[in-house]
Each structure stands twice: as C-alpha cells, then as structure tokens.
Image (spheres, helix red, strand yellow):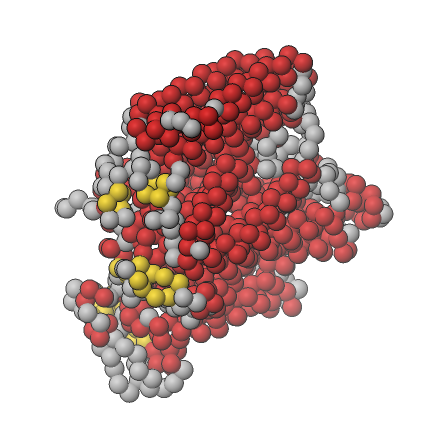
Amino acid sequence: MELNLATVWAGIIALGVFIYAVMDGFDLGIGLLFAFFPDQHDRDVMVNTVAPVWDGNETWLVMGGAALFAAFPVAYSTILPALYLPLILMLTGLIFRGVAFEIRLKATRTRPLWDLAFMGGSAVATFFQGVALGTYLQGIPITNNQFAGGSFDWVSPFSIFTGMALMMTYSLLGCAWLLMKTDHKLQQRMFVLMKPLTLILLLVIAIVSLWTPLADRAVYARWFTLPNLFYFLPVPILVLACVFGIWRAVDKGNDKLPFLLGLALMGLGYSGFIISIWPNVVPPSLTFEQAAAPHSSMAFALVGAVIIIPIILLYTGLGYWVFRGKVRHGDEGYH
Amino acid sequence: MTALSALDLARIQFAFTVSFHIIFPGLSIGLASYLAVLEGLWLKTQNPLYRNLYLFWSKVFAVGFAMGVVSGVVMSYEFGTNWSRFSTFAGAITGPLLAYEVMTAFFLEAGFLGIMLFGWTRVGPKAHFGATLAVAVGTLISTFWILASNSWMHTPAGYAIEAGRVVPRDWLEIIFNPSFPYRLVHMTLAAFIETACIVAASGAWHLLRGRDDAAIRKMFGMALGMLLVTTPIQALVGDAHGINTREHQPAKIAAIEGLWETETGGTALNLIGFPDMAAETTHYALQIPHLGSLILTHSWDGEIKGLKEFAPQDRPNSLIVFWSFRIMVGLGVLTILAAAVGLLLRRMGKLHQSRWYLRWMVLMGPAGMIALLMGWITTEAGRQPWVVYGLLRTRDAVSPVSAQQVGVSLLIFVVAYTLVFGTGIYYLLKLLRTGPQLEDTHKEAQQTNRSVASQGRNPIAAVDQDIEE
C-alpha cells in the first residue's frame, strides 16, 4: 500500500511537471521570441495570446513544488537547497516577467524597459530552469536526508547546456503556439522561424540524449542494454517522425499541427528523462519510496488530488476554449 | 561586528519576502469580494455606476494579484531552499496543506482570473459574474488553508513524532487546531479592512480634488460602511484571539505586554515602555493597574505569567512584539474612530464637504495594511525561538546552505523586489489617481438591459487610458 501511494504520487508529480513545462513553456517561449519582433503592435498581439492564461500556467509550477513538498518532503528539502541559486535566479526572472505582463501596456515612457524585463525575465527563468533540470539529472549528493554538496555544484558544462537546450525548446513551443494564435504577416514570420528552430531542437535533443548516458554509467546501462534498447528504440524514431511532421506541416501552411507535434516532441523528451531517472526522486540514489511522506500525508493529499485535479483540468480547458481563435492587432487588449 | 550567519540571513530574507508578499494577498482577498459585490449589484440594478467601479477596481486587483502571485511563488520555494530542515521535519503536515491550497484555491483564482479580466466579450454577464465569484471564493479558500498551516505551527495538534519527524494522526485536529478559528477570522477581517481603507482613501482623495460624482461617493460610502461594520468586530475577534494566545503561548503574551514578573492580585497594563531583554525589565513603563488582567483574563485579578517564568532561551523578543502590537492596536482604534466619525458626518449631511475628515481618511489609506503587517510581526516574532511552537526551534530549521548563498539570494531579492514591486506600487498609485471612468450615466440608465450588457462588451477598451499621461 505504501509503495502504491508513492508510485501514484510520483505519477501525479511527473504529470504536473509536464503540464507545467508545456504550458509555461509556450508562454515563456513568447518572451524569448520577443527578441525577433521589435514592433510594438506585434509584441502586443503576442502577449495578448497568453494574457488570459499565463497565470494558470504558472500555477503548475507552484503545484509541482507543493506536491513534492506534500508527498516527498525529503526530496523537496534536498533538491531545493542543491538547486539554490538556479532556483532563486529562475524565480527572479519570473518576478520580472510576471509584473511586466501587467504593467508593460500601462506604461508609455518606460515601456521599452518593461519589454526588456519581459524578455530578460523569460530568458533568465527559462535558462535557470534548464540549469536546474541538468543539475538534477546529474545527481544530488545526500547524507542524512540533507543536501551534502557545495554551493556551486550546479555549474557544469552539462547544466549550462541543458539551460540553453530548454530555451530552444520553449522558443519552438512559443513559435508553434503563435502560429496557431496569429494570422497574416505575423504568422508568416512564425512559419519562417519554425523550421530553423525545429532543426536546432533536434540537434539539442540528440546531444542531450547522448551526453546523459555517457556521463552516467547507470543511465547508460538502462538505455543501451538488451532488451531495454528495443523497448526504448521507438523514442528516437518518434522524435524523427515529429520533426518530419513539423517540416511538412510548415510547408503546407498548417497552423495547428506544428504545435501538437511540438507537444509530442516535448512528451518524448520528457519520457526519456523519466526513463533515465526512474525510480529515483533524487538521482542518483534516493528512490521515491525512500523519500515518501508518511502514509497518512500521502493519502490525505491524494483524496484531494484525485477529486480536484480533474476539475482543474476541466476549467483550465474551459478557459482555453473561451479564449480560442486568433488574436489580431487592435483586439481588445490587456485591460 | 560579527558576520551574519546563514540562519540570520535566512530569517531576514523570510521576514523581507513574506512581509512584501502578505500586503498583496490582503488586498486581493478584500478586492475580490468587493468586486463580486459590485458586479452582483450591477447585474441586479443595471446601474452602470457599479460596472464602472468594477472595471476600475478590477484593474487595481489585476496588478495587486500579479504581484501577490509572483511574490508567493518565491515563498513556496523558500521553505525548501532556506528552511529544508523545517520542511523535512514538518513537511508531512504543512506539505499536504499547501498542496490543498494550490489545488483548491490557486488554480481556481488563476483559472477564472482570465475570464474576469478579459472575458467580457467572450462570455455572458452571468458567466462573467460566476468567474468573479470563483476568484473571490478562491481567495477565501486560500486564506483558509494557509491559516490552517500557519496556526498549526503556532498550536500544533493531531500529530505524533516518529524518528525525529512529524507524522499526521488526525487531519481534522490538524486543520482545526486550537488557534485556527481566531487566526482565520482575524486575518480575513484584516484583509477586508486593509482594502476598505485603501478604497476609502482613494475616494477621499478624489473628493478632495473636487471630483464629486456618484461613483466616487458610492465607493467612499461603501468603504466607510465596511469599516464601520468590520472594525468593531475585529476588535472583539482580536480580544478573543489574545485570550486564546494566553492559553497556548503564554510567553508571547508576556512579551507583548513587556511583563517580567508574575504578579498576584491583578496585573497592570504597560501602556507604553521599552522592554529590555538583557536587563529583564521594561523601562519607562506607563502602567494602568488591573487593566492587564481585565483585558487578558476578563477578570479584576486574573494571573498573567511574566517572562521570567520562561528560560532566557525560550523568550521571544519583547521589544519588537511590544511595539508591533501597540501599533496594530493603535491603528485599529483609530480606524474604528474614523468610521464612527464618518457615520456622524454622514448623519449631519457633511460627509463629502468636511475637508479635514477627507484628509484624515487619505492618511488612513495605509492604516489597514500597516496594522495587518504589525499583527503578523507580533504573532510570528512572538512565536520565537520556535518555528513549530514547542517542537522545532528556528535555529534547527535552517537549510545546510552557506551564509554566502543566503546572503546573495537576499541581495538579489532586495534589489529585484525594490525594482519590481517598487514600480508596481507606483503604477498602482497612478491607477488609483486615475479613478473610475466618468460617464454619462443618465443616458445609459435608460437603455434596456440587453444593450447595457452589449455596451459592456467592450468596456475595457473604453477605460484603457494611459496612466502615465
């Protein structure tokens, strides 16, 4: 029973983190793409495509933290000190960005500064989120249920690379989202951006996929021994299929398929990540069963999660449906 | 001077970030309910005045809410980054409570906020009202959970300790722990009062500037009415909370009162004074005999424990809580007085003309906010040296991180908060200065409900003016 609850919670958190990465991914991506779109009107349209939903998107980040805290307090209290500075910098980026959302349209003189805050905040938040991810994947030393590493353990070529990799991923997702939500000239420029972004992402995925197993013997063993290799082989094949699909969709001017395939790409990357760390909640050695909260905590929180998360998904979906369709220049804006 | 330790820095950081944070949820809780009332009144009366007020205050709400969210995200991670030993120790209880807050409140607020702010042209008036209600209820649910968690840290119940960690035994006892009802009501009212003070001050400011129209009068009147009802109740709730604290955290009460000896035959009240932790005395105390007993035990000669009953390492800092408490109570009394004078002036028909009163109300704008902050300082500093009262000391709760790390992050937060929230507050004030939209209400009042609703289809563009102009 104990084991099952921990597994269920690991699943919920894995799902929550994925939902976060997808949803905040495309709206952070919009901030990253700001750099390519200096025109104020274009930027307004870009921000307006996510204005009604970004807050809900970011709530999944809080959900991830809270669920980890509730179900795996030991993991929460070791991962967070280990990722101290990257997380602080990520949060700082999110602060600048979140407030810029509200204020950039209300400012005139200082508007370029708020646009910079939006762009820079998105970039910093994404980069350090990626750094945190890379650091986590590389493993966190623990003794007596407490983090036992140094302040700057997180600085490594790998984590810097994953930081940039995540920026690429979110840019692609943001671009695909804007394909879907804009039209005319702005959309044309997204179509132009889509192909190079896809190629770069493919390269990034390939590098991370090789780097992770080469750096970690256990991960290597998991991926490259038989029969595992056969089970996991579909992952790279599907990645290639998605890339091909995006290419075709862009050629044909399909404005929805690239986003769906972008999601699929992220899903595949994420499944690779889960395969690499399973069954640890803190790599390289703390399993989620060892880190689990007392049974009564997990059970109490699970009752709520099972009832409420579907309702959340329902009204989140409703929100997206209410704001469906293209956003155009001069549409009712941000207040 | 010795360098600050990671513990000191983590405490400073927490005090800084949480103080910044709590101001905004306080405003969000109050404004969300106010907006729900305004929209309900609009739907009922079809008077566009309410809609204009709604649109105006929803903009203030949006900015305040965003600042609350981003400063709150920091909080939910700070427990792990800076207070990992606390999280390991008490995570089994505070974790699920936080998870419930996120699931039942944060998503509800964030999910419907979009419709509330941008959904006018996308959904019907009733659905829009539903969204506003969802956001308002969300803020109250959030208050419920976070106060449950905080109260549990003050008066832990329903737990056992196994292998040096807290294990939940009875969730109902945990949530409805002894101090929870008092704290919940006290904080909710504090949020309403904070908001009412700001709305009243904004109304008074516009009246002073000569903008005397129906919308300004309405919001000024509504805010004063709210203060008139809530502030006396708040005083009663505060009194009950004090008695509850005397029962569960006697050291905190002794520190608040600057009381060192346990006196028999009735305890005096130190009206003012300077508690000195080292000398174990309160200097320059101005005392009123028996008043301490009367307030805290509701009897002439009830006993109140003095600080000397507690070992020096178990005493909270009396100087801080003595004064934070007095500032809170002083502002509370002043607010009750302001509301009562407002009623009197209204009866005399001079409410909108008495410039001295309007000036006073402008000055009272931050009173609710400051009182709320002082109340939190009193209860949190008064819980020291414990983080979970009687179970875990604050010094044992900190993460095994270096002072440099905490120092750097503190520096980053101070800079970022000053920049971001400083300008955020600047824009909030600019918004308040703009005031609700002026409109020819007569013409619109004659229109049918349907056309009022369709007029409401693009009200956002109508009020979208640059606040820097």
Residue B445: give x, y in percent of width and height.
81, 49
The C terminus of chain B is located in which quarter? top right
Q: Residue at horizontal 53%, vertical 51%? A: A305
Q: Residue furthest left?
A: B1
Residue B80: give x, y in percent of width and height.
35, 46
Residue A107 as seen in the image, left or right of residue A133: right
Which of the pair B283/B70 is nearer the observer? B70
Q: Residue at horizontal 75%, vertical 53%? A: B43
Residue B86: give x, y in percent of width and height.
31, 54
Number of labels in the image equals 0
Looking at the image, is B269 positioned above or below residue B275? below
Residue B347: give x, y in percent of width and height.
65, 68
Q: Residue at horizontal 31%, vertical 49%? A: B84
Location of residue B60 (image quadrant): top right
Which of the pair A185/A142 is nearer the observer? A142
Residue A225 as seen in the image, left or right of residue B251: right
Location of residue A242 (image quadrant): top right
Q: Residue at horizontal 40%, vertical 63%? A: B168
Which of the pair A203/B373 is nearer the observer? A203
- Work out whether residue B78 can be spotted: no
- Work out whether residue A301 can be spotted: yes
Residue A89 as seen in the image, left or right of residue A314: left
Looking at the image, is B322 positioned above or below residue A42? below
Residue B92 as seen in the image, left or right of residue A256: left
